[in-house]
């Protein structure tokens, strides 16, 4: 344009973007060795609200002190499949976006359901509430609520010890998925495998979410077994002492013991019923396969992107159009069957049997308590019967003495008798009356024994 009066020239001004002080939070965590990396790898995990981090079996490193706790934020611990852990503070909205769970699921992890047992399957996460363990498990990470509690620290230590050893593949770099129309390949640590071979490799170990679930069930079952063992140790001496000596102190000990046993039985029963509910429903167990659903989604995205790519069409123009369907069938035919829940079923059955054994121990203690109570009741009934017999005997004796008193009252009246002038008549009369009363007592007592009103 010229430099006339109606010509304008927009000056090019470069604006410097201000440095952002807020650290953005990623909507999706990093895929780890528990899942296969794809070409569209998610962004790195969020470092917002970060308190500390640690890796492998090491401890948690404390971060700076300058950050303020966000409103409504709670303390969580994040573990990935490699055993790397970090302490973070997330609010409800961050957890909902990160794990893709509804808000009502967070209420299950609240203090109202402190001793409830629930295992819920969602689209991309599994909500676990087993006794003191409250966690959200995805295919790539696990978020543990209130990790600094004394009971939860056992679960955290087991995760640090077992997760690095249970990881089937430990990727040393960013892997990508190479998709074409003839066959799909998956990168595992720099080694490219076809989909069937890769799927077989992934299934050699349990998926990440089942590893976490197994550790959680192991910790909970061990805690319940320990509680039952302590209860047995305290129960049998107290019950034996009660059987020897029925006293108020011993009865109070048994009452406290029985209330503890009832609460413990209810806690074991809740965990057992939740596992039994999962075993009875194959659909619920299938929904818990988060890694399988994640792999299927990644493969479907890769296949749909590969079918629409012009570059792939240019490289292999002679391939049939249904080759993507062939690759998809390979994915679904090798250990990615939605109805295949054998691994999870075997895992749950093992801990179901363990919980059933724990429940039987509690029931045996309760039966011992019931037997002891029956024995004590029999003792009390026997003593009550003895008291009744004693009372009946005394009543018979009182009747006999009353007869003698009646006769003595008759002769004690101020009426003249010819016997009064006879010497020695008093001893004979009193002795005769006494013998008669004794005979009456013996006759009535013998009749009571004949009727089995008094024991021999």
Image (tube, rainbow, N blue to C red):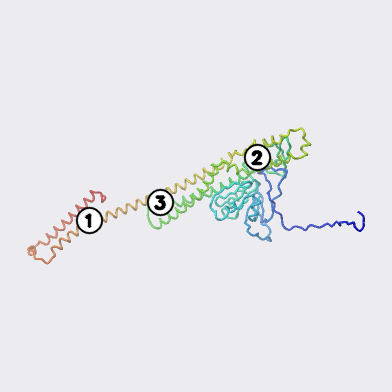
Q: CA distance from mark 3 to mark 2?
A: 56 Å
Q: Is residue 440 visible?
A: yes
Mark 1, other Cα within 10 Å: few <14 / some 14–19 / many ≥20: some
Dot 1 or dot 2, earlier in sequence = 2
Q: Circle 3 is placed at which residue position?
A: 240
The reply to whether discs 1 and 3 touch (Cβ–Cβ < 8 Å) is: no
- Rendering quarter of residue 177: top right
Residue linked to disc 2? 202
Q: Which residue is mark 1?
A: 396
Along the polypeptide, which appears first: circle 3 or circle 2? Answer: 2
Image coordinates for residue 350, horizontal then vertical, percent = 54, 42
Give how far across and how far down residue 117 sits, in percent: 54, 49
**Element at badge 3?**
helix
Report, in whole angstroms, how far the alpha carbon at label 1 lies from the one at label 2. 90 Å
Q: Earlier in the sequence, mark 1 or mark 3?
A: 3
In the displayed orientation, state which residue is furthest to the bottom.
414
């Amino acid at each position: 344009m010229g430099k006339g009066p109606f010509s304008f020239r927009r000056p090019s001004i470069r604006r410097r973007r201000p440095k952002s002080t807020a650290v953005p939070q990623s909507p999706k965590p990093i895929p780890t060795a528990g899942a296969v990396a794809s070409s569209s790898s998610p962004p790195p995990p969020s470092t917002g609200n970060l308190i500390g981090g640690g890796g492998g079996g090491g401890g948690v490193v404390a971060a700076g002190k300058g950050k303020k706790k966000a409103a409504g934020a709670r303390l969580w611990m994040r573990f990935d499949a490699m055993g790397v852990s970090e302490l973070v503070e997330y609010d409800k909205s961050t957890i909902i976006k990160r794990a893709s769970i509804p808000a009502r699921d967070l209420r299950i992890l609240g203090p109202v359901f402190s001793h409830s047992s629930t295992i819920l399957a969602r689209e991309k996460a599994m909500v676990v509430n087993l006794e003191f363990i409250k966690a959200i498990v995805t295919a790539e990470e696990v978020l543990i609520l209130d990790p600094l509690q004394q009971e939860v620290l056992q679960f955290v230590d087991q995760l640090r010890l077992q997760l690095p050893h249970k990881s089937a593949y430990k990727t040393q770099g960013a892997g990508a998925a190479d998709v074409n129309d003839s066959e799909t390949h998956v990168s595992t640590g720099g080694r490219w495998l076809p989909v069937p071979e890769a799927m077989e490799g992934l299934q050699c170990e349990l998926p990440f979410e089942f590893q976490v679930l197994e550790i959680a069930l192991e910790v909970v079952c061990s805690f319940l077994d320990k509680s039952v063992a302590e209860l047995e140790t305290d129960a049998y001496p107290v019950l034996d002492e009660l059987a020897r000596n029925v006293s108020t102190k011993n009865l109070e000990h048994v009452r406290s013991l029985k209330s503890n046993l009832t609460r413990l039985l209810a806690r074991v029963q809740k965990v057992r019923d939740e596992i039994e509910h999962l075993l009875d429903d194959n659909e619920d167990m299938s929904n818990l396969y988060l890694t399988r659903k994640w792999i299927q989604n990644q493969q479907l995205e890769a296949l749909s992107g590969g079918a629409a790519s012009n570059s792939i069409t240019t490289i292999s123009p002679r391939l049939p159009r249904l080759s993507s369907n062939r690759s998809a069938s390979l994915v679904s035919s090798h250990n990615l069957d939605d109805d295949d829940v054998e691994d999870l079923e075997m895992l749950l059955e093992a801990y179901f049997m363990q919980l059933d054994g724990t429940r039987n121990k509690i029931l045996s203690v309760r039966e011992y308590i019931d037997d002891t109570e029956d024995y004590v009741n029999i003792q009390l009934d026997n003593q009550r019967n003895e008291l009744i017999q004693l009372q009946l005997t005394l009543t018979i004796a009182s009747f006999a003495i009353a007869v003698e008193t009646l006769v003595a009252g008759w002769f004690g009246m101020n009426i003249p008798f010819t016997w009064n002038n006879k010497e020695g008549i008093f001893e004979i009369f009193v002795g005769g009356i006494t013998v008669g009363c004794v005979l009456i007592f013996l006759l009535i007592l013998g009749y009571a024994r004949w009727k089995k009103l008094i024991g021999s």
